Amino acid sequence: MRTLTAVLCALALFATGAQAQTVKDFLAQVTKKWTTPFEPFQLIGNIYYVGTDGIAVYVIKTSEGLILMDTALPQSTSMIKDNIAKLGFKLGDIKYILNTHAHFDHTGGFAEIKQETGAQLVAGERDKPLLEGGYYPGDEKNADLGFPPVKVDRAVKEGDKVTLGDTTLTAHATPGHSPGCTSWEMTVKEGGQDRDVLFFCSGTVALNRLVGNPTYPGIADDYRSTFGKAKAMKIDVLLGPHPEVYGMQQKRAQMKDGTPNPFVKPGELAAYAAGLEQDFDKQLAKQTAALQKSN
């Protein structure tokens, strides 16, 4: 958790202007971890981890091909493709690419992989213009936060479903971190039981402005809605866009044949969302105080 705390602190300082920190400074702090290789593995059921040590990317195996969930920074695309191959999968079998949110650290490989596979890209409807423009909301001209633009084949809203073969994922609108932030829910078989899995989009304040000139209109209300929704969901397995969200490395180290899967942890989402809400309240207060001081 120390790494996550350090990253959140860096993001908070950037967002509130507490330090004269540029985006390049921030990226210099996190890029090494975000691009460090991590050995791919079967996480639970038909879900596999193919991301880096600092950015989560998933492959879901179905009876009719593969679903890819997110990518990472552009420079990690080759690594992700290698990880997919290490598991014995073929890149060309990817039929759908799903996005949680349209930020540069999760979208960098979309254009390349989509072109190579012909897969359909599915994303939250409010993130569609961001993906197709390759920009960060509220900071459209900042090249440091940009990424290769990519066409969205299908835009989804709350309750929409994506089905491939024997696997169905349900979209949940969880805006705030991005306007179209989408969490994806599915069921896996584990130990003879059905387990509900949620790929939680995100709920950190990160680089977002909450007051004054907000990153986008209504952002604070969106965050509060998402926290309420997340705390009410009954989920057995919490996954997220960064490994630190759900302690991936620690749980991976605990995996052993014949023992319960450590990624099954009912109640983890509600506890995590409560912590995010507390952090949000702190960041909102800091940004409000900074705005009042500057006026």
Image (spheres, helix red, strand yellow):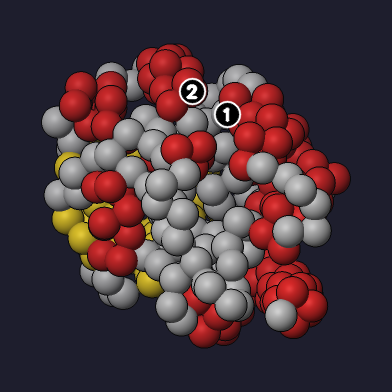
In percent of width and height, residue 116 lies at: 20, 22
Q: Residue furthest front?
A: 295
Label pair 1/2, CB-CB below 8 angstroms: yes
Q: Secondary structure at mark 1?
A: loop
Front position in the image: 66 or 178: 178
Query: Mark 1 — residue?
Result: 52
| SS for dot 2 | helix
> In the figure, is residue 236 to the left or right of 99?
right
Choose top left, top right, bottom left or bottom right for residue 274: bottom right
- Give the percent coordinates (x, y) of residue 83: 46, 20
In the rendered view, tell whether residue 44 sits above or below residue 175: above
Give, as a three-letter code, the residue at label 2: Ser
Q: Is residue 289 above or below residue 192?
A: below
Residue closer to the observer: 22 or 173? 22
Q: Position of residue 291 (x, y in %)?
A: 71, 76
What is the three-letter code of the residue carrying label 1? Answer: Thr
- Residue at the location (42% across, 58% down)? 137
- What residue is shown with label 2? 76
Q: Residue at x 45, y 38 (%)?
A: 143
What whole-number distance in Å separates the C-alpha atoms at marks 1 and 2? 8 Å
Please name the residue shown 64% across and 30% down the image.
31
Which numbered disc, 1 or 2, marks the residue that appears first in the sequence? 1
| Number of marks in picture | 2
The mark found on residue 98 in the picture is: none
